[in-house]
Amino acid sequence: MADHINLKKTRAQARFITKKSKTESWQIYTNSISSNTSPTEMWNKIKSIKGINHQPLPPNLLSNNNTLTLPSDIAEAFALNFKKNSDCTNYDPEFINFKNTVEDNLKIELETNFLQHDNHLNAPFNRNEFFNALSGCKSKSPGPDEIPFSFIQNLPTIGHDLLLQIYNTIWDKGIYPDQWHNAIIIPIPKSNKNKFNIINYRPISLINTLAKTMEKMVNIRLIWHLETSNLITKEQCGFRKNHSTIDILSTLHTDICNAKNQKQHLILISLDLEKAYDMVWRNRVLKIIQKSGINGKMFLFLQNFLNDRKIQVRAHAELSKIHQTENGLPQGSVISVTMFLLAINDIFKNIPKPTKHLLFADDCHIYCSGQNIITTVEILQNSLNLLQDWSHKTGFKFSASKSQCISFHISPNANIQLYLKNSPIPVCKTLRILGMIFDNKLKWTPHIKRLKST
């Protein structure tokens, strides 16, 4: 009881300090605006207040050691670079051989789509589902259809009824509009990277607003089916109701403390998946969906959703040519997130105890504790080998150089060598996990310093 009272007092103090700091920061920020402030700086501050963080592209950009100056050339270079992220050439040779062996039979199996019109998944959409999906939509930048969400939200009743009727026709006939396959990509510079090179940009996808609304309705049904049927692994904490990063962070912190109390080593590996969303094997995801008991109109919609995806890049008000992506899930869609959870669902299926694992979308971590560090390393290496075998049958690709290893133990000078496909995994003293910086002594000093500097 005493601990609970102290917790409440500490929380109240934290809220007071946070509120006071925000107030002081706001006062300093607003006081910096005066009659001497330049128009450019003024507009930047106004945009900052509104939460608009737009960084214009440099007029000249570097692509393959060539300097590009024409907006059309820059847009096309970005498009080719983003399209390349989904090319089959990114796959490991082992997976390509496996894929070539099973792909034809997999396509035949996917054509076996038993229609069922009498279940909830395949029923026509009703007004409640329509408005539920629409209520969560924010009026942001429209996609290729140039229709903001506010236009749809403010339609009269007859307009909403007509749009719902159109959605149900698409659903019933299995006709997926061609324009819904297209997305406009906006290049955004990566943090702390050279913004004059196109390889240091990430894509933000703008998809058709009308498509996005229907995808929300479909996704709500899809999630309902997966959750009520317990088809998503309980370890997955990403993008799920009643799950959060706190679940993972608290579990890990508890296990580290328990290991230290028992004078055990605990070694954790943070695994990096290269181009995780861009390289998803589409037919494998569809097969997982089919095996999950999803068929009929729902399956047909999801199949059409993945097929024939195209992108165009907008840079300096210029649009690139249209390019088709070979693999991966369309960015910017809620359905893509759910499909990714299915694609990565069995990543730890064959990992035996005592190895433990944490999963938040594509953030994957494995760890093990024990009194003998050599044995602990051997157990983790076996788990890494099993994960590598899994990747050769799924299309995912681990990066040893971008993965990291950290140890929490009594002897910090112990030599730890772990490998992914014969490449060593870097060992570090601090590791950022879902926004928190863990140090090998668990003193939180690096995390606190970072919070103070931001």
Image (cartoon, helix red, strand yellow):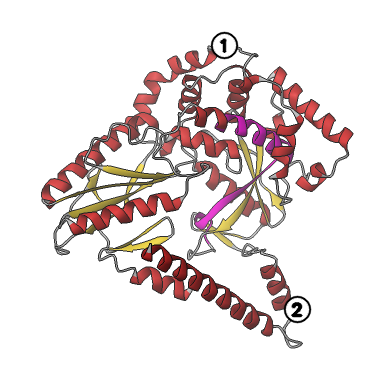
Residue 201 part of the magenta-drawn span: yes
* Residue 19: x %, y % from top left: 57, 73
Q: Nearer the viewer, residue 375 or 321?
A: 375
Vertical comparison of 261 with 94: above or below = below
**SS class, disc 2:** helix
Vertical comparison of 56 with 125: above or below = below
Mark on residue 39? 2
Q: Is residue 426 left or right of residue 69?
A: left
Residue 239 part of the magenta-drawn span: no
Quadrant of the image for the N terminus? bottom left
Q: Is residue 412 left or right of residue 139?
A: left
Picture mark count: 2
**How would you rate the neighbour count of disc 1 (Cα within 10 Å): few for under 14, some for 14-19, many for 20 or more?**
few
Read off the magenta span: 197-223
Identify the residue position indicated by label 1 in the image: 114
* Residue 36: x %, y % from top left: 74, 88
Q: Residue at x 23, y 55 (%)?
A: 258
Vertical comparison of 292 with 333: above or below = above
* Residue 128: x %, y % from top left: 73, 33
